[in-house]
Each structure stands twice: as C-alpha cells, then as structure tokens.
Image (cartoon, grey):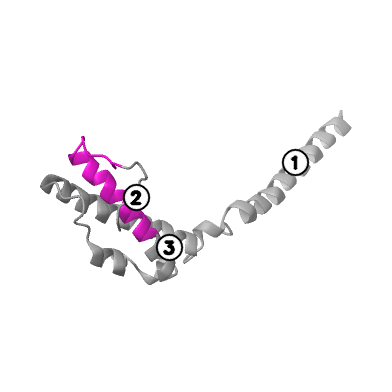
Amino acid sequence: MKTFVARTILGTALAVAMGVGLSGSAFAQYGYYDEFYDQGSARQARSYGYQSGYHDGYRKGRHEGREHDPGDVDVRALNEATHGYRRWMGPAEAFRDGYRSGYRRGFRAGYQDVNRGWRDRDYDDRYRW
C-alpha cells in the first residue's frame, strides 16, 4: 500500500514539474516573442495606418457621397498619409502604405453607403487616383 501511495505522489509531482516546464516553453513560443505584437514592427505600423486611413477615407467618402462628387478625394491626405501616426507604431513608410490603402477602401465604402445606386462603372475597383 505504501508503494502505491509513493508512486501516486511521485507521478503527480512529475506531472506538475512537466506542466511547469512546458508552460514556459509555450509562453516563449506564443507570448512575448510574437513578431506582430513587438513594438514598432512594420506589419503593426501598416495595420495602424490602414485603420486610420480607412476611418478618414470613410468620413470623406460619406461627405462626398452627400454631395454626389466621387472624384473629390483629399489628395493632400493621400500624399502626406501621416494622420494619426506615432513613432511607437513602427516605420513611417509602412504606416503611409497602410494609410493610403485604407483611405481608398474607406472612401469607396463611405461613398457607397450614402449613394446606394452608385457603382464602379467599369468594375475594376479602381479610381483615377
């Protein structure tokens, strides 16, 4: 009976030790070292830029949709493409790329929300800008 209890305790201790040891490995694999969540990565900067650009483009698209003017894009905002950028987000050029992409899609979505009948006439999903 004592050997059974000793084996049970030893087995439980071994299982706990392995669990603690492997949890550190899992943390290293999926926790802090995940590239996307590192401060200042290019992918993260592009994501922040896309979100900021989409928001600005959507707002501008809704405004122009009410005026029925799909060609009145804020070219200055697209050229600068830095609205909302902070240094901790990552490389500025990655932010600009994301901003421009998000702005174009946001403008289109905002314009279409106001003008349901409007569509891209040649179906290439591109504007002249």
Tell me what residue is drawn at x 22 percent, y 57 percent.
73
Of labels 1 and 2, the one closer to you = 2
Magenta range: 98-121
Cα distance between the residues tagged 1 and 2: 59 Å
Q: Position of residue 5 (x, y in %)?
A: 82, 32
Q: What residue type is labelled 2?
A: Arg
Element under disc 1: helix
Quadrant of residue 128 within the rendered picture: bottom left
Q: Residues within 10 Å of mark 1 (few under 14, many from 20)?
A: few
Upstream in sequence: badge 1 or badge 2? 1
Could you tell me residue 77's position as x and y percent? 26, 64
Amino acid type for the residue under numbered disc 3: Ala
Residue 47 shown left or right of residue 60 in the figure: right
Q: Look at mark 3 in the image and give the residue it sits on.
A: 45
| Mark 2, residue position | 126
Could you say which quadrant of the image residue 3 lies in? top right
Which of the pair 10/86 is nearer the observer?
86
Residue for badge 1: 15
Cα distance between the residues tagged 1 and 3: 42 Å
